[in-house]
Amino acid sequence: MTSETLPDTLASPTVTSAEDHKNEKHDKNDEKDQEIEERIKDLIAWEDDPAHPRNWSKGKKWATVAVVSLYTFVSPLASSTMAPALSDVAHHFHIGNPTIVALTLSIYLLAYAFGPLVLAPLSEIYGRTIVYHMSILTFLCFNIGCAFAPNTAALIIFRFLAGLSGSSPVVLCASSVSDMFNERERAFAMAVATMGPLIGPVAGPVIGGFLTQAAGYRWIFLLLAILSGASMAIGIPLLHETYAPLLAYRRMLATGDLEKAAAISTMDPNRSSTRVMWISLSRPIMLLTRSLICFSLSLYMALIYGFLYLLFTAFPDLFSETYGWGPGVAGLAYLGPGIGFLIATGSGGILNNKIYIKLSDKNGGVGKPEYRIPLMILGACLSPIGLFWYGWSAHARLHWIMPIIGAGIFGAGMMYTFLPSQLYLVDSFTYAASVIAAAAFIRSLFGFIFPLFGEQLFASLGVGGASSLLAGLAIVVGLPFPIWLWFYGERMRARGKLTK
């Protein structure tokens, strides 16, 4: 077990000598695997080659970012588009249990938790592009299945399968940006590529509300299938492979450099294809359970993400009952956090790059992941302000714009937190897709669980009290954490064997 591990109380409560021996054996295997990976990287080092993704033209890079952003918008859109149609779904399938009704919506996020654990490591074996395209294709098919599901069980199963497929772009987008942009350039590109998981869920209820009123719930899933097909039509010609080790391997084969190509797969006689697959698939869980940096950042992002979905559970009742809005118009309330996300996306990407470059220059031109943290501190301050504003303006029944402004402030704070956290992870760990998959696992679990008790929370405490509780948690956890990371993050990374 490395120095950078979870506390014993969160790991195994009792460890026998046999288990110690087993752990020591695993550590030696992990060290051997890591050594092999480093030797492979040395063998295929080609950073100065024009074909390397980081040396592509700006046009080629940003075309790839645009396609990735499109994919990451369509998939999260499905997480909430059917929210305004839940009553129609319940009526059509004769569902009387409110938990089952909620499950038809939230099962999608449960799939989001588990899909990345498989799909992200596969992208580090077979490349990003094939995983993107196959995921969107199956996502399209499963949404058609949702549209024509004959019963509740079939709808839930197809929703889960659609979530598994749709999780791929969400977890791979940060990896693609990391493949193409270095640390001093990637903040704005990361902001653009990763805003889909935040913009999609807030745009979904707006689209779903009006579409349900006009054409019925089935057209929600048919629209998602149409958007998936359109995005594939754009993505297939424009999306280029960005994973450098795979590109180098292909180039060796194409140029006849078979000796180096063979060396990649025969670096160790015991490194079978099964072993490679096992290493890749177990990597996200290993990062999550053996890296305190990965675990704590993932938990921090998950908490803020869960707050967003708790707010979403209160929106329909608040704006329909308190302000008298109809289902379609009430969906427009979700644009509040969406506007906050958009403002923070543009400003956050620019600010993060400037702060990172300035601090790096002061450090002799050497950058550190900790230089991402100042923006995170700003986000940690804005999030509770937005929650207090939203809750108590709604409690006082002020003009409808006031709670929407509060939700927008929270949305900006969330993006200012989400962006530097993602950047910190990809800056710190070699396998960007795997570490983002680890973070997505916890984040999606929180997004699945929190809405299940959201209605009861707001009903028992009221919108003001519930929002104050969330704001208090955001202060207690959100403010100290970035400060702790600033002072101790580098030390924790230095102790870990899994970081760069």
Image (tube, helix red, strand yellow):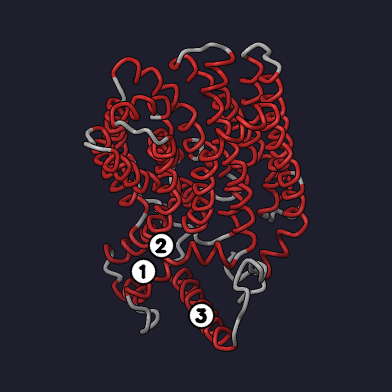
Residue nearest the observer in this picture, 87 or 250: 87
Which mark, by number, is residue 26?
3
- How busy is the neighbourhood of tag 3: few (under 14 within 10 Å), some, or many (20 plus)? few
Disc 1/disc 2 C-alpha distance (Å): 16 Å
> Label 3 near label 2: C-beta < 8 Å?
no
For the question of whether residue 70 can be seen, the reply is no
Left or right: 114 as drawn, with respect to 16: left
- The residue tagged 1 is 277
Q: Quadrant of residue 271?
A: bottom left
Amino acid type of the residue that numbered disc 3 sits on in the rendered structure: His
Left or right of 422, for residue 468 = right
**Which sits in the foreground, 310 or 68?**
310
Who's the residue at 76% across and 54% down the image?
484
- In the displayed structure, 221 sits above or below 434; it is above
Closer mark to the observer between disc 3 and disc 1: 3
Q: Residue at x 67, y 14 (%)?
A: 397
Q: Residue at x 64, y 49 (%)?
A: 300
Please provide percent x and percent y for residue 487.
Answer: 78, 56
Alpha-carbon span between mark 2 and mark 3:
26 Å
Helix, strand or loop at disc 3? helix
Label total for image: 3
Q: Nearer the viewer, mark 1 or mark 2?
A: 1
| Alpha carbon separation for disc pair 3 and 1 | 16 Å
> Which numbered disc flags the more N-terminal residue, 2 or 3?
3
Report the quarter where the N terminus lies: bottom right
Q: Secondary structure at mark 1?
A: helix
Q: Residue at x 43, y 57 (%)?
A: 117
Q: Which mark is residue 245?
A: 2
Q: Is residue 22 left or right of residue 153?
A: right
Vertical position of residue 271 compared to residue 172: above or below: below
